[in-house]
Structures are given as C-alpha cells and as structure tokens.
Image: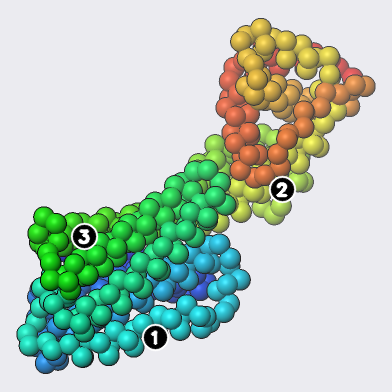
C-alpha cells in the first residue's frame, strides 16, 4: 500500500503545483502535500538505501521523514487556521512556526546522539531500546499528536461554518483524517513507552507496528480525499453554471429579441456560449440579469384577469407549489412576448410577477431553470397563454 500512497501524494502535489503562486493558504496546502510526499517517499527501501549510500549517514532517511512530517503538520495548521480566521495568515512567523523549528532542531540533535551502527527503522526495531532513540521518537509523536489534535478541532469548527453539501463533508473527512493522526501518534507513543520499560506490545511488536501503519495510511488517504473535495465541488458548480447558461439561452433569446437594448454589448452567439468555459459565471450572471431586466421592460402588457385565468387552468391541470408559480411565470412571459410582437399598449390592470424571497444568484438560477422548463412546455406556450393574448388595449 505504501508505494500507492506515495504515487497518490506526488500526483496531488504536482496537480496543486500551480497554487503556489496564489494566496498564502493555497501555498500552505501545497506545502503540506509536498512534505507528506517527501516523508513517505524516503521510507521506501530503495530510497532509504540510496540516501544512506550517497550520504554515508546511517538511516538519514528517518530524520528526513520526520523533518518533512513536521513541515507538513505546520502547513496543515496554517491552512486550517486560514479557513477559520483568514487574517491569521498575515502573521509570519507565528508562535506555531517557532515551535515547529525548535522541534526540528531537537530531533536533529537527538538523531545524531543515537548510536546508529547500521540502517534500521526506529519505530520497528530500535526505538524503546535506548533513551536517545526513545526521546527522538517521542518528540516527533508528541508534536504530531498535538498538531493533528488542534487541526482536527479546527476542521470540525470550520465544518460548522460551511453550508451543507460537499464542502461540509470535506471538512468532516479532514477532521476525521487528522483525528486518526492523533490515534496514530498515541499508538506509537504507547508502543515506545512499553518497549522502553522492557516489555512488548500486546499481540506482538509486529502487530502493533502494522496496526499503527494502517491507521497512518487511513489518515493520509482521508486527508487527501478531504482536500480534494473543494476543487471537485467547484468543478461540479462550474459545470452546473455552464449547463444553466445554455439551458437559459432560449428564454433569454426570446425576451431580449423584444427589448434588445437591455443586452450589454454584442449579444453572445451560441458558439460563444459553448466556448464560455473560464468566464461562465460572469456570463451566467449577465444572462440572469438580462432576463429579469427584459421581463421588467415587458411589465404591463399582460392583463391581470387573463393571468389569473391561466393560473386557474394550470392549477386544474395538477400544478401546485413552486411548479405552479414557475408555470404561471412562463405563461406570463409567453403572453408578454406575444403582446410586444403585436405592439399592444399597456393594459389598465397589468399582471405582475410574484416577488422572489431570495436574490442570491444560485437561487435565481435554480428558479429560472424551472421557469425555462415550463416555458418549453405546450401547457404554458399555447393554450394557457391564449387568454392573456385575447385582450386588446
């Protein structure tokens, strides 16, 4: 499993490489994955041997692993602090950075104080058999446990500030992943203390190491999944906006054909809508505004009595709730467009569209998509629109 995790970590690190030029919190996230990737890579046997042979320092890979792990922990803390309090990113270096630096210096000193006769893995073979090795590993595990505990708490708090959906799920997964990091640190610390006292772990040392390694792998995978959800969520939202832009085009085109003056600049062609990948949200906002502005310009062309007749017909056809309101609005648009084409004058008592409770773009798009669906329906485009067209002014 370890080689697969290494590949995944480097893939995520390379994928996020472009973010190092963005906001500080994005650089922190990239640094966290880079640190994790380095820490896991140097544990591969071939890499460990290559480092030993090229440097002549026995088990230098272990020190590199733990120093990179501290860098990753510090970067995770920076990132989650930015999620909870963006202004906190402006303080650098902060106290947490000094603590990480002191821990790294302490680890380096303890590492070279250990009598390392040949390459070995501290956690599996030597830690607990000597004071220096035990102190070295405990220093790292204590830092890891505290850092992951703080991060888990902050991720949980951040999840409460996110709206329900993928982003909140991502925060929950990150809180769980970092909590498993605490479990890993506790397991390893307990194992070290048991070994230092001359005993062995329940079930055997190998079983304890394997169990803690499994917890570590699960923690890393959950962190990868949790941090991948926000960009996936953003991608899904962008796709939904792109689809909405195209779905609303027929409604927008019919309305703006009657009041072309409300279109800002040259009306976009269908091809331009298809190509609007990067600026899709801006185009969608314009489309919504222009639909609403065009409808506003057509107010007063539909008689209120006729519109109520349409409402009755739709209700008798089984429409209710939001579908009834959307169907009435679609019929109103059909009637208003037809009246404008016939150059009708404003009626004495015009029907108006019922006000919406929310003005948020996402809610407005969702509503207009429902209106657009009924706008294409024969129930609102023919028979239900007829009464509204029967009254001449």
Q: Is residue 337 above or below residue 10?
A: above
Residue at 52 percent across and 67 percent down: it is 81
Q: Is residue 383 above or below residue 172?
A: above
Q: Which residue is more in the foreground, 368 or 320?
A: 320
| Contact flag, marks 2 and 3 (Cβ < 8 Å) | no
The nearer-to-camera label among 2 and 3 is 3
Query: How far apart in space, not on screen, are marks 1 and 2 (Cα)?
Result: 61 Å
Residue at point 12% right, 64% down? Answer: 200
From the viewer's side, name the closer residue of 381 and 84: 84
Alpha carbon of mark 3 to alpha carbon of mark 1: how far?
26 Å
The image quadrant that residue 1 belongs to is bottom left
**Contact? badges 1 and 2 (CB < 8 Å):** no
Q: Residues within 10 Å of mark 3 (few under 14, many from 20)?
A: many
Position in image of residue 245 (x %, y %):
56, 43
Mark 3 lies on residue = 212
Q: Choose the circle earlier in sequence order: 1 or 2.
A: 1
Of residues 324 and 344, the one nearer the viewer is 324
- Nearer to the camera, 72 or 308: 72
Q: Which residue is mark 2?
A: 263
**Residue 69 appears at what percent x and percent y?**
31, 74
For mark 1, what is the residue?
A: 102
Sequence-wise, the earlier of marks 3 and 1 is: 1
Residue that appears at 66% across and 52% down: 266
Picture coordinates of residue 33, whole percent (x, y): 34, 68
- Marks 2 and 3, the one that precedes in the sequence: 3
Q: Residues within 10 Å of mark 2 (few under 14, many from 20)?
A: some
- Say how many tags the image has: 3
Q: Secondary structure at mark 2?
A: loop
Report the mark closest to the observer, 1 or 2.
1
Q: Is residue 244 visible?
A: yes
């Amino acid at each position: 499993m370890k080689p697969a995790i290494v590949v995944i970590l480097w893939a995520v690190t390379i994928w996020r490489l472009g973010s190092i030029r963005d906001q500080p919190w994005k650089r922190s996230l990239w640094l966290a994955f880079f640190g994790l990737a380095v820490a896991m890579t140097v544990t591969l046997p071939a890499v460990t041997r290559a480092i030993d042979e090229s440097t002549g320092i026995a088990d230098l890979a272990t020190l590199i692993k733990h120093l990179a792990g501290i860098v990753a922990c510090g970067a995770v803390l920076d990132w989650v602090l930015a999620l909870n309090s963006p202004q906190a990113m402006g303080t650098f270096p902060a106290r947490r950075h000094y603590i990480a630096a002191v821990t790294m210096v302490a680890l380096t000193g303890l590492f070279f104080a250990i009598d390392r006769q040949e390459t070995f893995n501290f956690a599996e073979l030597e830690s607990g058999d000597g004071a220096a090795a035990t102190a070295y590993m405990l220093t790292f595990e204590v830092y890891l446990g505290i850092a992951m505990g703080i991060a888990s708490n902050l991720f949980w708090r951040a999840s409460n500030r996110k709206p329900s959906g993928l982003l909140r799920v991502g925060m929950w997964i990150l809180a769980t992943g970092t909590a498993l990091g605490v479990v890993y640190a506790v397991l390893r610390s307990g194992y070290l203390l048991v070994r230092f006292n001359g005993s062995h772990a329940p079930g055997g040392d190998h079983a304890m190491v394997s169990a803690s390694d499994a917890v570590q792998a699960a923690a890393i995978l959950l962190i990868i999944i949790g941090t991948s959800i926000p960009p996936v969520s953003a991608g899904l939202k962008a796709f939904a906006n792109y689809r909405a832009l195209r779905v609303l085009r027929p409604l927008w085109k019919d309305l703006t054909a009657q009041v072309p003056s409300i279109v800002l600049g040259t009306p976009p062609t269908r091809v331009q809508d298809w190509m609007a990948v990067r600026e899709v949200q801006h185009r969608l906002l314009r489309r919504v505004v222009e639909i609403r502005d065009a409808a506003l310009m057509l107010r007063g062309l539909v008689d209120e009595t006729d519109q109520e007749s349409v409402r009755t017909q739709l209700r008798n056809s089984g429409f209710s709730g939001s579908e009834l309101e959307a169907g009435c609005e679609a019929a109103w648009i059909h009637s208003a467009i037809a009246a404008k084409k016939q150059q009708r004058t404003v009626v004495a008592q015009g029907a108006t569209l019922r006000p919406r409770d929310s003005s948020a773009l996402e809610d407005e798009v969702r509503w207009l998509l429902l209106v657009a669906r009924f706008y294409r329906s024969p129930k609102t485009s023919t028979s239900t629109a007829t009464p509204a067209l029967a009254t001449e002014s």
